[in-house]
Image (tube, rainbow, N blue to C red):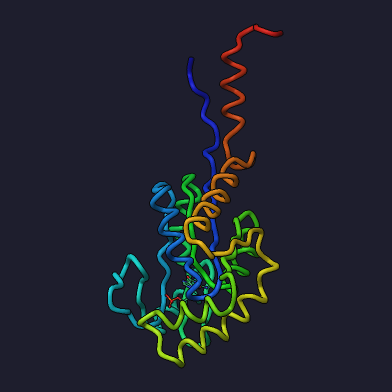
């Protein structure tokens, strides 16, 4: 039987936000291990490159001028000044291309970026990762070797604003026990993939009906 071409499934855009230090990166890495079919969107940033980070894999480290040029030319799906210091943004082209080709993409961004993505792409799946309490977040930030006291205080100030934005997310998960939070993020991903608007049910329906011949008519 010849196959009739059908519109390809559009990919899912999974947005993961939450304060710095809450463990978004770890959760996303685990999700990508479990589902290598998901694409990680590499953000652009004007912040300095930290030891251990790989340019082009962790971030594209670019100058302020280059960042603003990209923003002005519409090359960023969203961008924001994070912690009041550095700019971070999501390059638009790789995300558009992956979604159009039916591949799922995950973004790790701040609440401002999440708000812009929600406005531009209301079908994006929005997940907020919260710490179990403020003390746990403070401890995690202080334990990061990369942060001095000033940076911890700045990130705690940003966290207050991030908490204020929780209401715009569809899912909130608490990263208390890492393995539980990983399972929860995967559960969101799997359930969202099964939504009728994403799962390619028309093609399945066509095959099922074709396979029945005249049975049950
Ligand atoms: P860090 O400097 O610790 O790597 O990242 C700081 C924060 O920047 C992260 O917690 C994340 O929320 C935010 N961030 C990273 N990439 C992007 C991006 O592309 N867009 C926006 N809006 N925020 C980002």
106 w.r.t. 5: above or below? below
192 w.r.t. 28: above or below? above
**Quadrant of the rendered image containing residue 9:** top right
**Residue 150 placement (x, y as % from top left):** 46, 93
**Residue 167 placement (x, y as % from top left):** 70, 68
Name the foreground residue: 22 vs 94.
22
Name the foreground residue: 118 vs 142.
142
Left or right: 125, with 23 as reference point: right
Look at 59% across and 61% down and name the residue there.
173
**Residue 144 placement (x, y as % from top left):** 39, 79
Look at 55% across and 53% down and name the residue there.
184
Left or right: 91, with 199 as reference point: left
**Residue 84 placement (x, y as % from top left):** 52, 87
Name the foreground residue: 147 vs 41.
147
Left or right: 33, with 83 as reference point: left
Q: Quadrant of the C terminus?
A: top right
Q: How many marks?
A: 0
Looking at the image, which residue sits at the far bottom? Answer: 150
Look at 60% across and 60% down and name the residue there.
126
Left or right: 87, with 54 as reference point: right
Look at 46% across and 77% down and name the residue there.
140
């Amino acid at each position: 039987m010849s196959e009739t071409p059908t519109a390809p499934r559009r990919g899912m855009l999974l947005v993961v936000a939450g304060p710095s230090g809450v463990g978004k990166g770890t959760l996303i890495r685990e999700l990508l291990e479990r589902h290598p079919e998901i694409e990680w969107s590499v953000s652009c940033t004007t912040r300095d490159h930290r030891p251990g980070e790989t340019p082009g894999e962790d971030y594209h480290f670019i100058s302020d001028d280059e960042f603003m040029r990209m923003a002005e030319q519409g090359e960023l799906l969203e961008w924001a000044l994070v912690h009041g210091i550095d700019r971070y943004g999501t390059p638009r082209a790789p995300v558009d291309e992956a979604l159009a080709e039916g591949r799922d993409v995950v973004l790790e961004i701040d609440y401002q970026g999440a708000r812009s993505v929600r406005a531009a792409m209301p079908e994006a799946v929005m997940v907020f990762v919260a710490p179990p309490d403020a003390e746990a977040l403070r401890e995690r930030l202080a334990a990061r070797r990369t942060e001095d006291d000033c940076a911890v205080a700045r990130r705690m100030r940003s966290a207050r604003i991030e908490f204020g934005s929780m209401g715009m997310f569809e899912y909130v998960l608490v990263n208390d026990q890492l393995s539980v939070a990983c399972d929860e993020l995967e559960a969101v991903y799997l359930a969202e993939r099964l939504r009728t608007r994403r799962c390619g049910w028309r093609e399945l329906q066509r095959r099922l009906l074709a396979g029945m011949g005249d049975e049950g008519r």
